[in-house]
């Protein structure tokens, strides 16, 4: 009878949470194509798979095999395209559904590890109101699907029965399947694998360690073999560079890695962890972190760690996962700033924050009162409403004139030039989606002749010079066009700000 009551209560809580999420999601849903570029790449790869072209860049005239993005999310995209058509809006909505499914898995996971319904409810509300999670659930990116599969992995892991032989435990195989999917959606899923294996090693469950390790290696091998046959992982190559956006600076040395580690830890502690978790402020990366940001960030992080270490169950599992995630991110190139890379960890940071605040309140209040004051963290939701309002405004806003001009030229190319035209531009995936012509990026080199030779090798017919704000345009493209006017003929222009389409002459 009591079990049925708890099931009914959980069902009501999840129903209310789902309704709240759908209401907010509908208000902040942005139908515009995001300008980050990777979303277009995922769409292109998914469309290639759906059309039977294989895992290739169909926007490239040579249909070259893609070796940058893991195949997991493009496979999901291809399935959606096959069933529902190739409208980008369908893919956006699918990511919203992935976040909704994540909420369900999170509720049961948090309730299990905290042994408190209040913690699960408060954390769920903070996740629903988190502007970063909401934003990524409305764009065609892999973070939210990865969040669902990684959360489902952790939930399934808590169901493993160590009293029975591991090869007879169905949950172990569910965990392995979900781990495999997670890793093939985002390479950073290795943090999840490391976190789980560390938990098992410290807990001395050696048979589980052996089974998971062997099966995962076998399942990961095909993609790794393919990757090596195509020259190795592009992520590893970028990791070894001083700056992926300035290849002329060469490979990073020990001093560069040490500096990168310090810069990343500085940024994550003082800014990105607090901002990601509560999404209250927007950091100003043009300025160094202030003393107040540092003090707030350290206190904030301390509460999260305190909360994780005081979980009733599986504290080691959550801790090792978060530690593995931060360890990997600390070695990422420090020019990759922003919330994106830490986004899949946000619900677990929220879990640590809520449990930490509740544990502190329990310790400083008398026992009869503590069962009421543990609900106080729910007041944090009040701080999140301004961001929801801002997201509503952004969803209704028009795209900036810089991007409008860029897409206008893409449309002109699609309407007026031959189908096999090759255009060199920044964000070639996005240009392809509006022009349906072949696109490539130009080479990031300050040597003009190398730049031009690369255009010839790539069979480039036209070049776009944009005003999107990327430093590569002014650093590499503009000087070449300015100093070699005989090579570039102006064909089309959009003004305010000026955006140009040049013909590359022989």
Image (tube, rainbow, N blue to C red):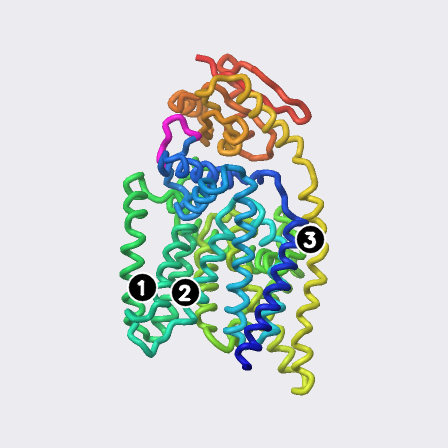
Disc 3 crowd, CA 10 A, few/some/many (<14, 14-19, 20+): some
Q: Is residue 77 above or below residue 144?
A: above
Query: Measuring 32% from the left and 43% from the top, which residue is drawn there?
Result: 227
Query: Measuring 55% from the left and 59% from the top, which residue is drawn there?
Result: 346
Q: Say the numbered circle drawn on residue 195.
A: 2
Q: According to the image, label 1 marks what residue?
A: 212
Using the numbered discs, state the Cα–Cα distance from disc 3 to disc 2 in whole angstroms.
33 Å
Query: Measuring 49% from the left and 31% from the top, which residue is drawn there?
Result: 428
Q: Which residues are magenta?
A: 59-65
Residue 27 on image: x %, y %: 68, 49
Name the one closer to the observer, 325 or 385: 385
Residue 471 on image: x %, y %: 55, 34
* Residue 11, visible in the rendered structure: yes
Name the one closer to the observer, 321 or 285: 321
First of labels 3, 1 by sequence position: 1
Disc 1 crowd, CA 10 A, few/some/many (<14, 14-19, 20+): many
Q: Is residue 411 above or below residue 430?
A: above
Does 446 appear in magenta? no
* Secondary structure at numbered mark 2: helix
Q: According to the image, label 3 marks what residue?
A: 388
Using the numbered discs, state the Cα–Cα distance from disc 3 to disc 1 in whole angstroms.
41 Å
Using the numbered discs, state the Cα–Cα distance from disc 1 to disc 2 in whole angstroms.
12 Å
First of labels 1, 2 by sequence position: 2
Residue 116 on image: x %, y %: 57, 76
First of labels 3, 2 by sequence position: 2
């Amino acid at each position: 009878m009591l079990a049925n009551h708890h099931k009914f209560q959980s069902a009501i809580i999840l129903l209310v949470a789902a309704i709240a999420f759908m209401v907010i999601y509908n208000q902040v849903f942005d139908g515009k194509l995001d300008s980050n570029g990777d979303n277009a790449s995922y769409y292109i790869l998914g469309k290639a798979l759906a059309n039977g072209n294989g895992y290739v860049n169909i926007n490239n005239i040579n249909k070259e095999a893609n070796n940058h993005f893991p195949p997991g999310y493009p496979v999901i995209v291809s399935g959606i395209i096959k069933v529902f058509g190739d409208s980008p809006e369908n893919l956006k909505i699918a990511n919203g559904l992935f976040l909704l499914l994540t909420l369900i898995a999170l509720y049961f996971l948090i309730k299990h590890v905290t042994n408190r319904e209040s913690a699960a409810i408060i954390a769920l509300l903070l996740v629903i109101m988190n502007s970063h999670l909401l934003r990524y659930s409305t764009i065609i990116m892999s973070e939210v699907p990865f969040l669902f599969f990684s959360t489902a992995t952790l939930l399934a892991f808590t169901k493993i029965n160590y009293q029975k032989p591991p090869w007879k435990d169905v949950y172990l195989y569910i965990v392995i399947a979900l781990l495999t999917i997670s890793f093939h959606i985002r390479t950073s899923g290795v943090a999840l694998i490391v976190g789980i294996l560390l938990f098992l090693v410290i807990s001395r469950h050696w048979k589980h360690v052996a089974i998971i390790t062997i099966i995962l290696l076998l399942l990961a091998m095909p993609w790794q073999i393919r990757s090596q046959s195509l020259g190795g992982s592009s992520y590893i190559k970028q990791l070894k560079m001083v700056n992926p956006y300035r290849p002329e600076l060469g490979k990073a040395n020990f001093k560069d890695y040490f500096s990168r580690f310090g810069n990343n830890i500085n940024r994550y502690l003082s800014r990105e962890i607090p901002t990601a978790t509560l999404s209250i402020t927007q950091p100003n990366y043009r300025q160094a972190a202030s003393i107040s940001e540092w003090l707030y960030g350290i206190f904030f992080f301390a509460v999260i760690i305190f909360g994780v270490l005081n979980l009733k169950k599986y504290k080691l599992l959550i801790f090792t996962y978060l530690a593995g995630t931060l360890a990997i991110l600390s070695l990422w190139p420090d020019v990759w700033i922003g919330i994106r890379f830490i986004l899949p960890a946000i619900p677990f940071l929220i879990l640590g924050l809520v449990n930490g605040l509740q544990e502190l309140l329990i310790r400083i209040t008398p026992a009869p009162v503590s069962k009421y004051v543990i609900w106080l963290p729910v007041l944090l939701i009040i701080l999140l409403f301004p961001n929801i309002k801002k997201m509503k405004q952004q969803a209704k806003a028009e795209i900036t004139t810089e991007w409008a001009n860029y897409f206008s030229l893409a449309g002109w190319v699609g309407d007026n030039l031959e189908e096999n035209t090759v255009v060199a531009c920044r964000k070639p995936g996005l240009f392809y989606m509006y022009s349906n012509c072949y696109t490539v990026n130009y080479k990031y080199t300050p040597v003009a002749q190398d730049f031009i030779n690369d255009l010839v090798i790539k069979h480039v017919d036209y070049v776009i010079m944009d005003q999107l704000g990327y430093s590569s345009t002014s650093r590499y493209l503009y000087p070449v066009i300015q100093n070699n006017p005989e090579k570039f003929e102006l064909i089309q222009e959009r003004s305010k700000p000026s955006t140009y389409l040049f013909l590359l002459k022989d």
